[in-house]
Image: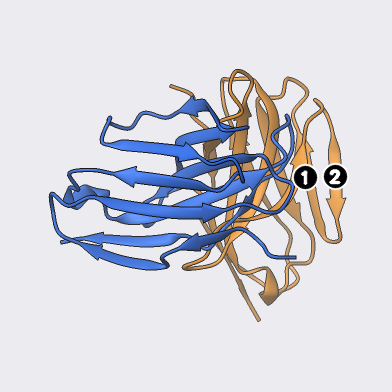
């Protein structure tokens, strides 16, 4: 069974601080996708990375795909209260396009 | 443009009953996937359909079935409902290629009593 371990599960920090969320697996993925989910809603796609070593920036968010395409990180610079939410990583299986999901990181940014 | 639409939004069923959930993908998206999400966990893959053919199936019992119609909409059926089937059922559509991100609907909240 492919697993995608996401850490930390919970993070509460002050506005202006930086943070990093990690997703790790022993399996290779064809892509790694990051989503944000609000309570009672479906996940919303933030970014997809497909090439080993790829780095994508979305304003204050930086996403990186590991060289071996087994792990990924999400770094937020100068966190703001609007960043509060549940962040999920999902790896796309090479064989059948299925997404394998991490358990999520619940992020709280205090003003 | 309309996003992914799911119906109904909420549903209460009794153990042993059957339920059908519906999903309309974004126009132009040929792939539809179904996920089950229990509170506090990431989504679990149930099915993926592409061009009306099943392209993947997760580790769910045969009580779960799905199909995709010529207009790419999809239905998820669950028979002989159990209390443990209570969850948020999410539908997602995509273009269907590697690295194509998914657009999710708001889900159907199913409660089995």
The residue carrying mark 1 is A63
Give above or below for A1 relative to A45.
above
The residue carrying mark 2 is A56
Query: Chain A shown in which color?
Result: orange
Q: In which quarter of the image is residue A49?
A: top right
Residue drawn where x is 69% and y is 65% of the image:
B2
Q: Residue furthest front?
A: B70
Residue A83: x %, y % from top left: 68, 68
Query: Chain B shown in which color?
Result: blue
Tell me the SS state at disc 1.
strand
Q: How crowded is mark 1: few (under 14 residues within 10 Å), some or many (20 or more)?
A: many
Answer whether residue A9 is visible to the viewer in this image: no
Q: Residue furthest bottom?
A: A111
Q: Which of marks 1 and 2 is nearer the N terminus?
A: 2
Tell me the SS state at disc 2.
strand
Quadrant of the snapshot with the C terminus of chain B: bottom left
Residue A4: x %, y % from top left: 53, 33
Q: How crowded is mark 2: few (under 14 residues within 10 Å), some or many (20 or more)?
A: some
Give above or below for A71 relative to A20.
above
In the figure, is residue A90 to the left or right of B79?
Answer: right
Q: Which chain carries label 2?
A: A
The one of B60 and A24 positioned closer to us in this rendering: B60
Residue drawn where x is 34% and y is 45% of the image:
B77
């Amino acid at each position: 069974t492919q697993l995608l371990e996401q850490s930390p599960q919970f993070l509460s920090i002050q506005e202006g601080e930086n943070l990093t969320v990690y997703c790790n697996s022993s399996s290779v993925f064809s892509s790694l996708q990051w989503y944000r989910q609000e309570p009672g809603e479906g996940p919303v796609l933030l970014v997809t990375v497909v090439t080993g070593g790829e780095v994508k920036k979305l304003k204050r968010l930086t996403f990186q795909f590991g060289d071996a395409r087994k792990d990924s990180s999400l770094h937020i610079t100068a966190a703001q209260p609007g960043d509060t939410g549940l962040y999920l990583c999902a790896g796309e299986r090479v064989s059948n396009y299925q997404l394998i999901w991490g358990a999520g990181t619940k992020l709280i940014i205090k003003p | 443009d309309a996003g992914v639409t799911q119906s109904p939004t909420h549903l209460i069923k009794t153990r042993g009953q059957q339920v059908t959930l519906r999903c309309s993908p974004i126009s132009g998206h040929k792939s539809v996937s179904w996920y089950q999400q229990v509170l506090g966990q990431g989504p679990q893959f149930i099915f993926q359909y592409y061009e009306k053919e099943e392209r993947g199936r997760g580790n769910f019992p045969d009580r779960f079935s799905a199909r995709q119609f010529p207009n790419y909409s999809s239905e998820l059926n669950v028979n002989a409902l159990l209390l443990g089937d209570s969850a948020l059922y999410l539908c997602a559509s995509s273009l269907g290629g590697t690295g194509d991100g998914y657009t999710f609907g708001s889900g159907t909240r199913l409660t089995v009593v």
